[in-house]
């Protein structure tokens, strides 16, 4: 039996759970009263956000993406593939790999480095864990999420399954990234402030778009995949307060959600098309002051993809600006750790909580979210790289002693620029009474201070030396650089495994 559409009405009620007090002291609640069904008119047939995003994704998959967007997506792909290879043997990555392998699913999608062929859901789960295995993957400050480690593993796994071309991989990746980024933007910054991590919250939507396009879904079918995907949204950021390794799978969880949503939609499952913009939809549930308009604002003419930044350092992006400011002052003033009496780091209010809570980390993730400990490492010449925050470094008493000299506070300038920018300021006070101050608004890798193509490939080469030889890395570079000419993504996947499993050329 069909139900009449719902209309929102404000009414006066008694005090109750969930009520908000009006200026005059009366209690206001929002109730929903079924509206009498009317014959549809042009005004009643406006598309939901899910339908609009599905149509957009379908069109760019069919017609292509701007060259500037293609350049961004290419950088994101090579950065993400490098991280998946480099981080494939970390303890939490091995746990994800063992889980996938023990599941025993069959399929044609590759788990990178290891070479296991399995179902796309499982390949994407493992590869996404690898891609976010360190805090070294792309971040979009404006929308506060890690999109590459969600969408690229999905697109690659499903592209292998359907034997897609490089052009199809590129377009599906772009569409999935843009949809995920817009979903994250619609709930930013409240989503993170409330304790929800945006990759598992917004990621299912972008993952469903990438998978659905590669499976040949039309706009109507894609919208249903989005409608189902929203029921998988979730994720908590308590790890920023006490550590743990579960964050590593926060980009993996939405990969399976998106692929599974598409599979269910293809089999007739349906969901609410108001999943994003409805009264109980994603935006209203995950943000106190969300913006439904951000989901579709300038859609097709303005790409949030171009606001994504890559990471030059293996730690939370909130640390990058103060880290560069600190390095600059240490070099410019020719200071040693013993010369420093106190360091004050100024960040946005959220940044101060996000990376200023853990002073003495006991595990790698805690270190990557501790600006105090990271500056302690940097004071002694240890910048966050792929192998940083090791057990040996975490036990180094010099770093911990320096961390005790670092205090973190809210900086008015950083707070005013947040969330669009995650800058910071550092003030050093020396033992002889001098004070030096340095502000960095745009750290290396941000859209305002981007890494060049050569720098991105340099990072890829450095972090994959244990997984690939130089010749193999060069072949991968050539293939990714010219993805539109690649006749089968399976040729690329065959190169993304350990040397013993790579095909001869």
Image: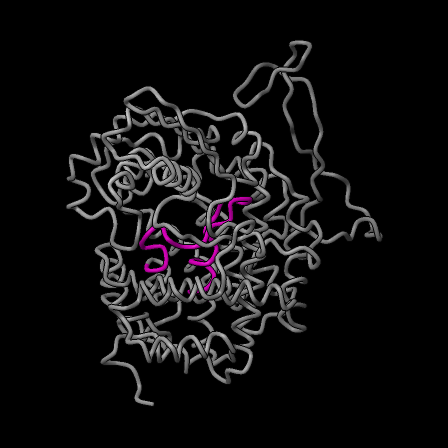
Residue 135, position as x, y percentages in the image: 35, 50
Chief SS of the magenta region: loop
Quarter of the image where one finds residue 429? top left
Q: Does 153 appear in magenta?
A: yes
Q: How is the image coloured?
A: one colour
Q: Is residue 47 above or below residue 19?
A: below
Q: Is residue 12 above or below residue 373?
A: above
Spot occupied by residue 30 in the image (x, y as percentages of width and height): 65, 27
Quarter-wise, where is residue 170 in the image?
bottom right
- Magenta segment: 130-154
Q: Is residue 236 visible?
A: no
Query: Can you say whether 72 is above or below 216 in the image?
Result: above
Residue 404: % across, % down: 25, 26
Query: Residue at horizontal 53%, vertical 25%?
Result: 412
Q: 74 or 247: which is nearer to us?
A: 74
The answer, for residue 277, to whether it is visible in the render is yes
């Amino acid at each position: 039996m069909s139900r009449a559409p719902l209309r929102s009405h404000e009414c006066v009620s008694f005090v109750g759970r969930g009520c908000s007090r009006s200026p005059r002291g009366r209690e206001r609640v929002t109730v929903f009263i079924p509206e009498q069904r009317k014959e549809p008119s042009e005004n009643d047939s406006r598309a939901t956000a899910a339908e609009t995003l599905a149509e957009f994704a379908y069109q760019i998959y069919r017609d292509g993406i701007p060259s500037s967007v293609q350049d961004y997506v290419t950088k994101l792909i090579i950065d993400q593939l490098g991280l998946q290879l480099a981080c494939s043997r970390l303890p939490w990555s091995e746990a994800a790999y063992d889980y996938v392998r023990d599941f025993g699913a069959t399929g044609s999608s590759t788990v990178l480095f290891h070479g296991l062929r399995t179902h796309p859901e499982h390949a994407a789960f493992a590869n996404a864990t690898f891609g976010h295995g360190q805090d070294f993957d792309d971040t979009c400050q404006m929308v506060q999420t890690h999109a590459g480690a969600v969408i690229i593993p999905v697109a690659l796994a499903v592209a292998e399954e359907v034997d897609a071309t490089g052009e199809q991989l590129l377009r599906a990746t772009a569409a999935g990234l843009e949809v995920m980024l817009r979903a994250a933007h619609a709930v930013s910054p409240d989503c993170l402030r409330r304790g929800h991590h945006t990759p598992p919250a917004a990621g299912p939507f972008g993952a469903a778009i990438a998978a659905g396009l590669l499976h040949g879904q039309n706009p109507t079918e894609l919208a249903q995949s989005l409608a189902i995907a929203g029921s998988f949204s979730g994720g908590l950021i308590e790890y920023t307060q006490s550590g743990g390794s579960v964050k590593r799978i926060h980009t993996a969880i939405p990969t399976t959600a998106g692929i599974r949503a598409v599979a269910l939609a293809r089999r007739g499952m349906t969901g609410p098309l108001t999943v994003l913009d409805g009264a109980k939809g994603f935006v209203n549930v995950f943000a106190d002051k969300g913006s439904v308009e951000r989901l579709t604002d300038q859609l097709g003419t303005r790409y949030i993809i171009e606001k994504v930044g890559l990471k030059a350092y293996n730690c939370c992006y909130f640390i990058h600006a103060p880290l560069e400011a600190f390095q600059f002052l240490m070099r410019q003033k020719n200071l040693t750790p013993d010369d420093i009496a106190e360091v004050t780091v100024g960040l946005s209010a959220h940044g101060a909580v996000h990376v200023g809570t853990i002073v003495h980390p006991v595990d790698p993730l805690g270190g990557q979210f501790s600006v105090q400990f990271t500056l302690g490492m940097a004071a002694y010449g240890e910048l966050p790289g792929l192998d940083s925050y090791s057990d040996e470094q975490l036990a180094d008493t010099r770093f911990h002693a320096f961390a005790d000299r670092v205090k973190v506070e809210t900086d008015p300038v950083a707070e005013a620029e947040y969330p669009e920018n995650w800058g910071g300021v550092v003030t050093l006070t020396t033992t002889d009474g001098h004070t030096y101050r340095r502000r960095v608004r745009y750290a290396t890798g941000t859209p305002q201070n981007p890494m060049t193509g050569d720098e991105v490939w340099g990072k890829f080469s450095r972090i994959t030396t244990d997984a690939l030889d130089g010749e193999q890395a060069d072949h991968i570079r050539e293939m990714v650089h010219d993805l539109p000419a690649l006749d089968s993504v399976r040729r690329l996947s065959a190169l993304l495994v350990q040397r013993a499993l790579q095909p001869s050329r």
